[in-house]
Amino acid sequence: MKILAISKEPNPVDWENKEAILKDEAKTAYELYLSGSVREIYFTEEYNAVLILEARDLAEAREVINLLPLVKAKLLEFDLMELNPYTGYSRIIK
């Protein structure tokens, strides 16, 4: 199942002097990418992280997200949403 994860700051964060944890975040994201748990990762224009995860369900996706150092440090939270296949083509294709 594909899961969309979008980050948000539960409280405003001063990202100055956060180089060490940001490096750990990048390392963990890379490891999750190599494992196949994270399929894609992006930033929005406002620097919110957007991840496409592959997981059995939302609970497993939450476990993956909770591995991220910024989540562990409570600097970021993620909203998770299931992505389901688009079924609208069935309206025009018989």
Image (cartoon, helix red, strand yellow):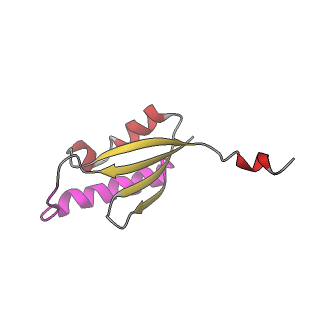
Is 42 situated left or right of 25 in this image?
A: right
Residue 73 on image: x %, y % = 20, 45
* Viewport quadrant of the N terminus: top right
Residue at the far bottom: name it.
Answer: 45
Q: Nearer the viewer, residue 44 or 63?
A: 44
Q: Which residues are magenta?
A: 13-39
The main secondary structure of the magenta stretch is: helix
Q: Nearer the viewer, residue 89 or 48?
A: 89
Please report the residue visible at 39 percent of the width from the left and 51 percent of the height from the top. Answer: 6
Is 46 situated left or right of 32 in this image?
A: left
Q: Nearer the viewer, residue 63 or 86?
A: 86
Q: Residue 14's quadrant in the figure?
A: bottom left
Please report the residue visible at 40 percent of the width from the left and 41 percent of the height from the top. Answer: 64
Is 91 situated left or right of 66 in this image?
A: right
Please report the residue visible at 60 percent of the width from the left and 42 percent of the height from the top. Answer: 84
What is the number of callouts on the image?
0
Residue 76 on image: x %, y % = 26, 48
Is 17 situated left or right of 36 in this image?
A: left
Residue 94 on image: x %, y % = 87, 47
Q: Is residue 33 magenta?
A: yes
Residue at the far right: name it.
Answer: 94
Q: Nearer the viewer, residue 90 or 73?
A: 90
Q: Is residue 4 magenta?
A: no
Please report the residue visible at 65 percent of the width from the left and 45 percent of the height from the top. Answer: 85
Residue 69 on image: x %, y % = 26, 48
